[in-house]
Image (tube, rainbow, N blue to C red):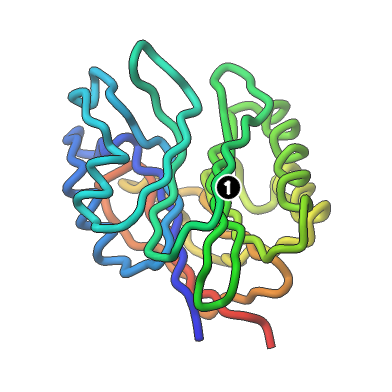
Amino acid sequence: MSLRIATYNIRGGLGMDDVRSLPRIAEVLHTLEADIVCLQEVHQNLPWSGLANQPRRLKHLLGSEVVFQRNLSLWFGGFGNAIVTKAPVLHVKRHALPGGREPRGCLEVRLQTNLGELKVLSTHLGLSDGERRRQVMRLAEIVNADRTPVVLCGDFNEGPDAGNLQFLLEQTGLRDAGVGGDFTYSSDAPRARIDFVLLSETLSEDGLWVAPSIASDHYPVISNIKLRS
């Protein structure tokens, strides 16, 4: 028995061809056939996104529950993280992360899945090394708050060997499901792996891959996960 998880920084639906299209993002998500998708850079009522309420629009386009966390507020809109799920939602927490130039957060959604209860986290870390260090310290507290199995997904803005990611893995016991995996950024000329699926020790991956698309500047990352024997 397995569960398909994906993570995708959608850049507000803006593709590498400078076309902003949420239906195209939804089409990419449909092809993934994922049970749970962690999203970053989801816009809500922003002028440069046509004032679209993207969480609500994605819920309509995908026919799934969409839980949203606004991290940055601008006028009557903003943007942040989201989790798209077909599994029943048990509980939601919206955590602020220590900021820098731009507010960041971690969206926590507890789900009842075919693997049991899971704590799914969607996050997007900052651009500077110093703020990422503060943010992963807070993430470690969130992960370690209880013994519920965790899937932590997101755009970490640094590679797999970077110090902050390694610190997080050491502090939490999480594993990188994509060791040796493909580059995820940027989607027109992939040169870095900065989007991750991290798993509790009670979970294991049964395959992990990217889905090439220019609908955003990132590729979506997909993994089938299961309970470790």
Residue at position x 45%, y 63% in the image:
88
Percent of width and height locating residue 66: 37, 48
Q: Nearer the viewer, residue 145 or 214?
A: 145
Q: Which residue is identified by label 1?
A: 108
Secondary structure under the numbered disc 1 in the rendered image:
strand
Percent of width and height locating residue 170: 82, 55
Q: Amino acid at mark 1?
A: Glu
Q: Is residue 213 shown to the viewer in this render?
A: yes
Percent of width and height locating residue 147: 76, 62
Left or right: where 49 falls relative to 84: left
Residue at position x 51%, y 48% in the image:
192
Image height of 87 relative to 155, above or below:
below
Left or right: where 3 falls relative to 217: right
Left or right: where 219 falls relative to 173: left
Q: Is residue 185 shown to the viewer in this render?
A: no
Left or right: where 20 falls relative to 168: left
Residue at position x 65%, y 31% in the image:
97
Residue most extreme to the front: 90
Residue most extreme to the top: 75
Residue at position x 19%, y 35% in the image:
20
Q: Nearer the viewer, residue 3 or 174?
A: 3
**Which corner quadrant of the image does residue 216 belong to?**
top left
